Amino acid sequence: MGVIRTGLAALALLASVTCLADLGENLSGQAATPQRPNILLVLADDLGYTDLASYGSEINTPILDALAQQGVRFTNYHSAANCAPARAMLLTGVDAHLAGVPNIPEMLAPEQQRHAHYQGVLGTNVVTVATLLEDAGYHTYMAGKWHLGTGPGQLPSERGFERTVALADSGADNWEQRPYIPIYDKANWYADGKEYTLPEDFYSSRFLVDKTIEFIDSNIEDGKPFFAYLPFQAVHIPVQAPQDFIDRYMGVYDAGWDVLRERRLTRATELGIVPEGVSAVRMSTTADWEALDAQRQRYEAKRMAVYAAMVEAMDFHLGRLLDYLKQSGQYDNTIIIFTSDNGAEASGSVDPHSFVNRRLTDSLGYRIDYETLGLKGSYSSISPSFASAAASPLAYYKFYAGEGGMRVPLIIAGVGLPVQGELVRAFSFVTDITPTILSFAGVASPGPRYRGRPVESIIGRDLQPLVRGSEERVYGPEETVGYELAGHAALFQGDYKIVRNRGPVGDGQWRLYNIVDDPGEANDLATAEPARLQRMLLAYERYVLENKVLPVPPGYNHLNQLVTNTLYNRMRSPILVGLLTLLVLIPFVVAHRRQDQ
């Protein structure tokens, strides 16, 4: 069942006609008028599918839950399984390979980096949604993580954003200006294109909301609408949160990850996020909670408590921004889009107290003791076991093409939207966000040339018909959407998906699932429906050719490549390469051994 409700259909159609009438005068890109909506695009980092209360979580997220009641929640929305490709598609509506960001640069093999479109930075052959809105008279602001390039012309201040404060790296500390992994000598922050020093009282979620409010308020009197992009650091590693938020979750996770995964599945089913009777695959990387001693269980439970606290802190500070919009009279004319760049991060060590992990965190100057976990100077993460719970009931997590890596929350909200508090079950994809924003703003998509240069065409779909409740799908049952990241691959068609997950967790085999009935990817239909599998495999090969997807070299492993590129190219330290290779691989080796016992 989609969001269509017959009693609302006529009202939805009338509202959409009225809205488009207000917006239509600005399709040519002339100066903005007060009738055009403000647009706030909020992006969480590494947030799992059921990490919000409105999607089945025990985490307190009242602000986002209220937004869900002022709009619609998408239950079948997919992003890339890694941050930079997701952000490239989110901001351009173009496939990541053609946009120049098939993967983060740290994971690209040398054989791939010889090709111009495999540099891991946003190409000049694409136009950002910020550029299009700025040219149409919008103020455009960004505060948060960028990770799409730092070279000439690559920072957000040169890609359509009028005011910016941006973290250029893949991540950083949330309490101070320091790197979180040895890739970086420092945490690289920029403000309006210039290097920036963070304030002493920095906490990422609070600071990014403060800057967003500052940017909006600086031009609020001129009557122009704004587009504000707020990509939080939460809940990317290092997972950190204020003590008062952590205290709220002490004891909540004492029963372990398997219990949490089942509880979230039950709640998500009650909410209608997933259908009745969904099976959830237990990942081979999920450890045996009962085999841990009491001290280790206590530590693992607090790691998850810090994670939950960071989610709630993000929600709380987002609430301050929405309060500002209400007090300034902007809220009723603002469309709010919230989503995550990918699924939950699972690279946190199985045993953070192992020799290798202690050496690594010590070398970075971080503590990992129980008492200060999550606070300034500490380093915390969640392991693959709790990451699977964060994605419940989905299989896999960040980096992989399983649903747990790609299917994430999406909320589109606004006071004036005709359908509110409903679920959208139709398939949608990250490339749909840019055309949807343009549709709300009444701004046309670019043609084959923009500002005198050729540009890639937007391939995403406008989701407004789903938001209005006037359509049940924006993709026809035979249309396909392809995806690839570091050899992990998928193709969506109607209710079906073919998927290939490589090692170290996957086996590299193509599988076929009905992800509407079976979002947990528990029932492989490849043998039962071989003809469908072959048709979809042919469609995937077309996707590969049309999007210039390059193969990974023999023996490629994205985690090994990350370590090798990072340390040989940036730090030239073979010893550290060995240490971090062990750090990355030990959690998976240990988990597989436990599974085999």
Image (cartoon, helix red, strand yellow):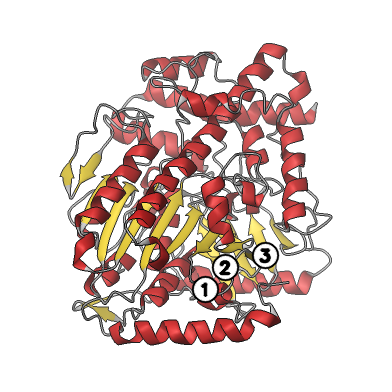
Q: Disc 2 marks which residue?
A: 428
- The local secondary structure at tag 2 comes to strand
Q: Are marks 1 and 2 in contact (CB under 8 Å)?
A: yes
The answer to whether any part of residue 433 appears in the image is yes
Between 545 and 278, the residue placed more toward the observer is 278
- At a point 41% along the width and 74% down the height, the residue shown is 440
Residue reaching furthest to the left: 194
Q: Disc 1 marks which residue?
A: 463
| Figure quadrant of the C terminus | top right
Q: Quadrant of residue 292?
A: top right
Sequence-first tag of 1 and 3 = 1
Which is closer to the viewer, label 3 or label 2? 2
Instruction: Determine whether 155 is above or below 373 in the image.
Output: below
- Report how far apart the C-alphas of labels 1 and 2 lie in the structure: 8 Å
Which is closer to the viewer, label 1 or label 2? 1
Which is closer to the viewer, label 1 or label 3? 1
* Mark 2 nearby-residue class (10 Å; few <14, some 14–19, many ≥20): many
Instruction: Determine whether 309 is above or below 416 in the image.
Output: above
Q: Amino acid at mark 1?
A: Leu
Q: Quadrant of residue 468?
A: bottom right
Left or right side of 355 for 378: left
Instruction: Point out residue 374 in the picture as x, y percentages from the top left corner.
Output: 47, 24
- Report how far apart the C-alphas of labels 1 and 3 lie in the structure: 20 Å
Q: Residue 497 bears which disc, if any?
A: 3
Q: Residue 453 bears which disc, if any?
A: none
The answer to whether any part of residue 380 appears in the image is no
- The local secondary structure at tag 3 comes to strand
- At a point 29% along the width and 68% down the height, the residue shown is 225
